[in-house]
Amino acid sequence: MLYYSLKRLGLAVAIVSVAMLLLFTMIYLIPGDPAAVALGPRATEAMREALRIKMGLDQPVWIQFWNFFVNAWQGDLGNEVLSDRPVAKVVMEQLPATLALIAGGMVWSVALGIPLGCWTAVKRGGMADRIVGVFSVAVIAVPSFVVAIYALLIFAVTLRWLPAIGAGEPGDLGDQLVHLILPSLAVGIGWVGYIARLVRASMLEVLEASHIRTARAFGLPDRQVTYRYALTIAILPTVTLLGVGIGQMLSSAVFAEIVFARPGVGKLVYDAILTRNYPLVTGAVLVTTVLFILINLIADLVVGYLDPRVRSRL
Amino acid sequence: MNVLEIQDLNVTFATEGGPLHALRNVSFDVPEHRIVGVVGESGCGKSTLINAILGLLADNGQVDSGRILFGDHDLTRLGPLEMQSLRGLRISTVFQDPMGALNPVISVGRQMLHIQYRSDLGRSEKNARSVKMLRRVRIPDPESALDRYPHEFSGGMKQRIAIAMALMMEPALLIADEPTTALDATLEVATIELLQDLQAQIGCSVLFISHHLGVIAELCDDVVVMYAGEVVERGTTRELFHDPRHPYTERLLRCDPAGQSGRTRHLPTIPGEVPDLRVRPAGCIFAARCHRYEGICDTVPPEVGAGGHRARCHRVTP
């Protein structure tokens, strides 16, 4: 298990490095002079030249990349254009709100998706199975911002059950949780459908396996066979899917944060793009990328923990 | 005393092409301390028979008539929970596929622990019992085997672990569904000997399903020959192999490659194929392939009487 973990960690570091290279190339290829963009049209050539030197743009491209690479690994993502504050600090301030949003989305998708998938697999072909099937496809098909707007209209504006905007009072956990319900539902509901479909399909496959027949032939209770013997195997693809799904949730978080006027990395990137604050965009995207890779690493480790075959193969 | 008595059992499956009569008037006994072999080609109803005994028929299958007597119970009348309380405890099963028979994500020790859930013993005593069973099936270093997972064992070892699990609660009846078919020849002999030893030690009866005549002759006391969901002949192993009465048994014995002396280009086969069980012929089920066919076979179904060495054939006077 230790060897497996180290191997996965090494792979994660390599992937982050490649992501940095791609990100750097992308910024480098964007047409226009970053210094000119940052300083605006009224700056003099001397001012632009001074900023270019400060940003290291006068150096060869591979040195620029090397500096970006080394600094980024040390947590230095440069300073943002508007207030000259360190990008890393600005992003980190916004990160907890986004993490809470995604964690909430995951809670929704897992807490509803796994039981629904399991239930429809056991009662396959029945009315409930069909209704959940239609529901799953529907929530997968509806974009998260549409869910966000309707949730806002119904629960916040019409029924007035839940707050419409903001992330709640700082320090007041209960208030923050209440503010989290609608945005996280918007982020997670599509994944309820995905997970319900996936768990149902893999559950049906596992229930046909001969070891399940053996377990029944040994007289194990139905509940134990379904949840302990079948579901632990059927859940494995879901864990992997969730790792990928979090990337998707990160992008739908942008919409949820804008619709619900929540602070967060998504809102930060959105504002940064509107003000052409490129260092901030780069930094926020890099942090998001690292987050995504980290979560996939965790997902892989969880699969390794749950499945001894994976553990010993790697 | 019989551990298991199957009387006139009929099982049908609802299919899109109409009801499929998978077992027809199946009757035989499994006496105490004896090993009864069931032999027949693929699709003869061997698996349906096991599932009917275990109460694990697929959703579209049902017992139409007949009884399966086990002790004081008629298994065809028991509810799912009563059936479950017998499975693994009084009736246990070893299946054909050793590779997939054990749960891949639960350690061997934990699976063996789960099987003992009905016992009052403490956890460490249960584990000690697991170790004892693993030692009996000759798993090397049984203590550490408990912490390992099925994929860490070879196919033969997995099958022995499955046998240990099946015999864990010392059942009165062990059903062995082609337990050696997936193993190579050397392992097959070893597994047969192991089963024989354990059966003698525990004193259970065994219902041994196979299509391998050599294994049946080696291991079993009595033999039941099945064809297309019917028992065509039953008797002691000696009677059946030395004096086969049903034409199907006769042909089957002649088809055993082990009986070939010298080289041959053509292995003997039985021409024709098993009939479609959705449209059973009015007469004898084997008539179309029979080398001793006569007029009556097409119209009147032969019956098999009770007791002794019997064959379901018009040409045989009981």
Image (tube, coloured by chain):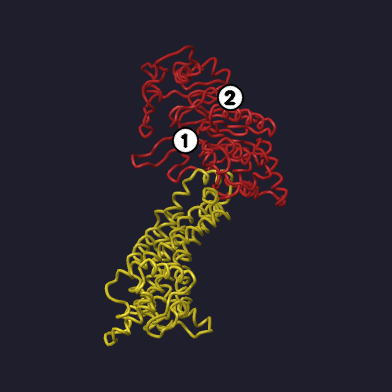
Percent of width and height locating residue A25: 34, 66
As displayed, is residue B153 above or below residue A74? Answer: above
Letter of the chain shown red in the rendering: B
As displayed, is residue A100 above or below residue A203? Answer: below
Q: Which residue is mark 2?
A: B222
At mark 2, the secondary structure is strand
Q: Residues within 10 Å of mark 1 (few under 14, many from 20)?
A: many
The answer to whether the residue labelled 1 contacts the one labelled 2, judged by CB atoms less than 8 Å apart, is no
Q: Colour of chain A?
A: yellow
Q: CA distance from mark 1 to mark 2?
A: 22 Å
Identify which residue is drawn at 70% across, 32% down.
Answer: B201
Residue A241 in which image quadrant: bottom left
Identify residue type, mark 1.
Asn
Identify residue type, mark 2.
Asp
| Tag of residue B10 | 1
Observer-nearest residue: B41 or B127? B127
At mark 1, the secondary structure is strand
Observer-nearest residue: A73 or A63? A63
In the image, taking residue A138 as reference, residue B1 lies left or right, namely: right
Q: Residues within 10 Å of mark 2 (few under 14, many from 20)?
A: many
As displayed, is residue B217 above or below residue B180? Answer: above
